[in-house]
Image (cartoon, coloured by chain):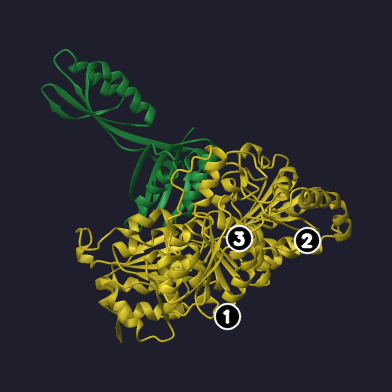
Chain colours: A green, B yellow
Amino acid sequence: MKHTLSVLLQNKPGVLSRVTGLFSGRGFNIESLSVNETLDPGISCLVLVTSGDSTIIEQITKQLHKLIDVIKVSDMNEVDYVEREMAIIRVKAEANTRAEVLRIADIFRGKVVDVSPKSYALEVTGAADKIQAVIDILRPIGIQEIVRTGTIAIARAKKK
Amino acid sequence: MKITGAQAMIKCLEEQGVEVIFGFPGGVVIDIFDELLRHENLTHVLVRHEQAAVHAADAYARVKGTVGVALVTSGPGATNTVTGIASAYLDSIPIVVFTGQVPTALIGNDAFQEVDIVGITRPCTKHNYLVKNPADLVPTIREAFYIARSGRPGPVLIDLPKDISVAKIKYPPLKPVQMRTYKPTYEPHPGQIEKACKAILKAQRPVIYAGGGVISADANKELTELATKLSIPVTMTLMGLGGFPGTHKLSMGMLGMHGTYCSNMAMRESDVIVAVGARFDDRITGRLDAFAPHAKIIHIDIDPTSISKNVPVDIPIVADCKHALTGMNTWFDRNSDFNKVSQGKKTEPWRKQIKEWEKKHPLTYKKEKGIIKPQFVVQKLYELTKGEAIITTEVGQNQMWAAQFYKFNNPRAFMTSGGLGVMGYGFPAAIGAQMAAPDRTVIDIAGDGSIQMNIQELATARQQKCPVKIAILNNGYLGMVRQWQELFYEKRYSGTNIEVAPNFVALAEAYGAVGLRATKPSEVEPVIKKALATDNTVIMDFVIAREEGVFPMVPAGKATTEMLLA
């Protein structure tokens, strides 16, 4: 099962390689990864998507905790959370498909960020399944290039 | 007043209570070595290969219960320490390794003797540092010692660029290390202690399975108290030997691949296993699905990652072994449901069963006329040292015979590379142990293969006047691999014949040490006696039965009850 882990780290050189080295060295899987500074410049937040049964996820969480530079590990699957990815997709857009591509962009609330006579580059954000849906629907028209970010996630605030 | 980085480093080592450093100099650490000359209370042991410095620091730390220190240069000096560091990592031994580094301005430049040792050792250290700012030097060293010795101990590496050791700095006043991210749990959860104690009270067939954590937490007394209070039989891992008295009537000896028949049978039939500072590795469990099928498992460990890693645990207790065992002992003392006599009576049939297993298949070997058996040599070493020597081992058959036939009644007396299994560990470890305990008898039980992996340390031993004794069990084979080839590869002895070997007696003499040889059983005792009476480094070359095997043996991937007994 897929798990999204949010990890707070000391913002120091080499810390990311401690995390990725742990995953490769112990045979765990990283499906996506995204790191950036938090409000506190001394701390960075790493969001990582991995998969495995509960024993593996438990072991991953514990092993991450064991790294001296790790401050906190949260398994987002245990809480209610929002996750987003962004993709920029360059898709063939010639006379007969230009309008259709724009319609699709509109349906998925995407934006055109680059235009050429024969293509559009669309920016789309959303959860991983939405990005996948856009890709699937654009594929027959002719996708020329895709860049995608890793997932970022935030826990929803308590409503009460 | 400002001092140099090298001066600050040495001052900080003294502040941390360091008395001995194992090291080897080189271009970028000359300033530090220069400073060492001015500190008579800090002994530097000059090794002949950097790997040996780390193994020696490792054994020094084990004997003294303190942090061992090694100091080497950049590049090859640093890469040579990797095996030693990885071994200390797997055995959870507190050491701090200082490696020199090229000046900060040259880092990343492929400079002479430059290597990214922080990158190389990241997966085999508990933590590591590259010091880039002179002001960070002293706080980093303090933090390194704190990390090495606290929680689950382990090796920490500090990479020191040349310019840091010559920079002028102000020595910061000592204050306790406070870390935002690292806070080991020492105290057990009282609810878990109670659950564990209740489970033990209900047990009909309890077993204590003790590992190296008992020794590193100095919890041997508390363990003995618990075992005797409830009359629970104890089995130990290789790393746990000495954590419970080996000659105690409740001791079943070692368990696992070359463990005793009764230990492995007891684990199989037990209904409650109390694992203390042990980590259920593959050499202990054998085939996982057949491991301890009837047992409720209580697991005390300071490292949460060890719990439920290989075997699901019913009652986890994340804590220091000493604290957890004290908590359990106190619980039993205060609980009116617990009666020592009736509890002992209830589990009497279980102990009788264990004694029967022990009688059925004791640790034993066949004597052959005129041929020295390795087990006989270890038994004689045990007898003639009254079981009071510090024993180090190499890796392979020599290690297993030492573990099986030398009985350890005290902790910190048996040093072996348990997790990584480093051939070449034993001899430098013996030097480190002797530096930690100058008045003890220290013996490296070695094979003719592994002793050659760090034989150059004869010069170190001689230079330090370390009267360590090396007992080579010489069979002309890389014996453990040969044993596997005999049993599972139809005796195809590929790459294991090492008959072309030095004359170990002449070799010892070449270094100014003493060489002795025994070729028949009657010569064993006189050779050992002579070695023990010699105030010099001694090699005892015991020419043993060529194809003797270590038994019992659980073949890899089999259940621990599927033991080969001879």
Camera-near label (3 vs 2) is 3
The tag earlier along the polypeptide, 3 or 2, is 2
* Quarter occupied by residue B132: bottom left
At mark 2, the secondary structure is loop
3D distance between C-alphas at marks 3 and 1: 22 Å
Q: Nearer the viewer, residue B124 or A82?
A: B124
Q: Nearer the viewer, mark 3 or mark 1?
A: 3
Residue B178 seen in the figure: no
Image x and y of residue B432, in percent: 49, 72
Q: Amino acid at mark 3?
A: Ala
**Residue indicated by mark 1:** B439
For marks 1 and 2, the one nearer the N-term is: 2
Q: Amino acid at mark 2?
A: Lys
Residue in the foreground of this view, choosing between B379 and B350: B379
Chain at tag 2: B
In the picture of the structure, the residue carrying the numbered disc 2 is B249
Residue extending furthest toward the left: A117
User: Badge 2: few (under 14), some or many (20 or more) residues near its Cα, within 10 Å?
Assistant: few
Q: Which residue is mark 3?
A: B402
